Amino acid sequence: MGDIDPAFVQEEEHRPKLSIIEAQGIPEIDLSPLFHHQVPNPSAIDALVKEIGSACKEWGFFQVTNHGVPQSLRQKLEEASRLFFAQSLEEKRKVARDAINPSGYYDTEHTKNVRDWKEVFDFISHDPTLIPLSSDENDDRVTQWTNPSPQYPPQFRAIIEEYIQEVEKLAYRLLELIALSLGLEAKRFEEFFKDQTSFIRFNHYPPCPYPHLALGVGRHKDAGALTILAQDEVGGLEVKRKSDQEWVLVKPTPDAYIINVGDIIQVWSNDTYESVEHRVMVNSARERFSIPFFFFPAHYTEVKPLEELTNEENPPKYRPYNWGKFLVNRKGSNFAKKKVENIQIYHYKIA
Ligand code: OGA
Ligand code: NI
């Protein structure tokens, strides 16, 4: 193999250190108190809410175990993902995304205008999904996103749909715990997700001969409300630790999910919780697979700090923005390399 394509090369300051800090990792939270049906145990739920609250505040990231998503279903999904990516490029491109419909296969995503060392298959969780036609604020037209139907592996679409139902239940449960941890009613956020724009992504990070120069995904924050990530046993996800700004590897825990607070929860909570930067290292020996579920509200949601969490001493830190416009803007800028930074929540920050 010759030299690396410069499109993949990170600026020096953003290149990964190949010696890794693993100590003091993200908190691990056992969700089993949610599943004791016989007698509800309010003190166990209270303790869980406190744990979630501290994890959101101190890390913005945590892992959950005993989360209710059947392990066999996750395994079926992971197996299907491997089979899908093992196909030829020509086969995969039969379900390629395009500039209009962002669901499907592609291998040219750029994060912060540097190309990621990965290929992905995106699938919206509710087909069709209503979405603004353009990111132009004066354009009221709405369109629909739909999913392609991959022919291989057989049943891929059915397995994905079954998995989405389960992972969505987990998303709603986590949202309730987060609402409670902010002193809100458990169902405070639910209304925003009635016509949700969520999607699931299959990531494949092939082995990379230049792990010191390239990243699987460059540093970024997730734009939505929550991300629920299944990673395999290889490892590579790094989180920027809030206490000292060091990049910390998230050690794979079998069957656990990695949860992170996205930008929308940061805005809703008026910065009580922050969406934390993360990135993915690649390695020269092993390929890696991961499957994030991005929990996104309805396109017409006006994202803004909640009234209950603001007052005269703590005024709103953000101007409201329209989620659908934000999302369409992002999708467009991820599709092709641009000279300017893509849209970020701090653009709505009140000075
Ligand atoms: C993402 C992401 C992490 C991973 O796709 O936004 O952060 O481990 N992925 O694949
Ligand atoms: Ni991410």
Image (cartoon, rainbow, N blue to C red):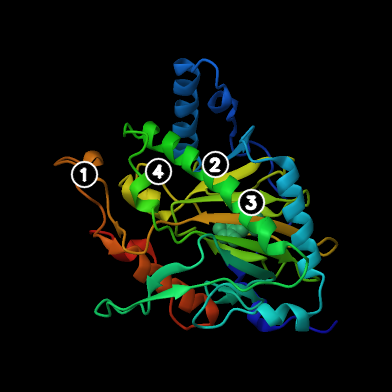
Image-based side of 153 in relation to 296, left or right: right
Q: Nearer the viewer's eye, disc 3 or disc 1?
A: 3
Quickly name the residue at label 4. Answer: 273
Residue carrying label 3: 163
Farthest residue in the left direction? 312
Please tell me which of labels 3 and 2 falls first in the chain. Answer: 3
Q: CA gap, disc 3 to disc 1? A: 35 Å
Question: Is disc 3 surrounded by few (<14), some (14 to 19) or many (20+) residues within 10 Å?
Answer: some
Q: Earlier in the sequence, mark 4 or mark 3?
A: 3
Q: Nearer the viewer, mark 1 or mark 4?
A: 1
Q: Position of residue 122 (x, y in %)?
A: 60, 67
Foreground: disc 4 or disc 2: 2
120 shown above or below 100: above
Callout 3–callout 2 Cβ contact below 8 Å: no
Q: In whole angstroms, how far apart are the C-alphas of marks 1 and 4? A: 16 Å
On screen, 212 above or below 142? above
**Mark 1 packing: few (<14 Cα in 10 Å), some, or many (20+)?**
few
Image coords of residue 201 (percent x, y): 61, 62
Q: Position of residue 240 (x, y in %)?
A: 55, 50
Q: Quadrant of residue 84?
A: bottom right
Q: Is residue 273 left or right of residue 292?
A: left
The residue that mark 2 highlights is 170
Q: Which element carries disc 2, helix, strand or loop?
A: helix
Give yes or no for contact between labels 1 and 2 (Cβ–Cβ under 8 Å): no
Tag 4: amino acid: Tyr
Q: Is residue 339 above or below residue 235?
A: below
Task: Give the residue pinned by disc 1.
Answer: 307
Residue in view at x 78 percent, y 66 percent: 153
Q: SS class of the residue under badge 4?
A: loop
Identity, as a three-letter code, of the amino acid under mark 2: Leu
